Amino acid sequence: MTIHLENIATMPVINGTNASETILGTDQNDVISPGDGYDTVYGLAGDDGLNGYKDESGIPYYWSAAGTLIAYGGPGNDVIGGKDGNDVIYGEDDDDAVWGRQGDDFISGGAGRDNLWGGG
């Protein structure tokens, strides 16, 4: 999935803090930036960008790197970017793009045609 930069302004954007938190998305196409810390993020339905997105060239961008991410994409074609900690990421249903980063990550695409990258 590609989230074009010009479309981000029209999507619900959910910003976290640098504290550890749990963030729930909506049934729409969300962009969730959890911030640093030990975060758990649920994208729920819709095509979501969790801690990242891809531009029109397919290049991934991430908002926060510090901490650990536990992410559940939910139904929809999600883009999920890990953090530098030991992340646990579930793409779940549909066609997801998931990037790990540094750390010992567990990544599962789930049902659908997923693209998974382990990171460094």
Image: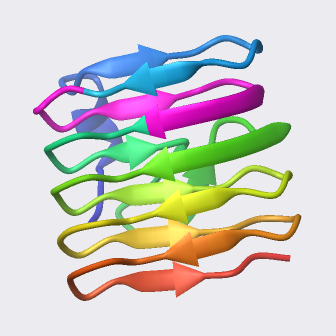
The colour scheme used to paint the residues is rainbow
Where is 90 relative to 5, above or below?
Answer: below
Residue drawn at the location 41% of the way across and 72% of the way down: 97
Q: Position of residue 103 (x, y in %)?
A: 88, 64
Q: Residue at x 81, y 58 (%)?
A: 86
What residue is shown at x 69% (from left), y 81% (from top)?
A: 118
How many badges with numbers are in the image? Answer: 0
- 73 displayed left or right of 63: left
| For residue 116, above or below residue 75 | below
Can you give x and y, in whole percent of width and height, for residue 94 in the image? 17, 72
Q: Is residue 57 visible?
A: yes
Q: Where residue 55 sits: x, y (%)?
A: 42, 58
64 relative to 70 in the view: left or right: right
User: Magenta includes 35?
Assistant: yes
Q: Nearer the viewer, residue 25 or 7?
A: 25
Residue 91 among those drawn in magenta: no
Q: Quadrant of the C terminus?
A: bottom right
Residue 65 in view (yes/no): no
Of 50 and 10, the residue lying toward us: 50
Specify start and end residues of the magenta stretch as a single range: 26-41
| Along the viewing direction, whichever of 89 and 97 lies nearer the viewer | 89
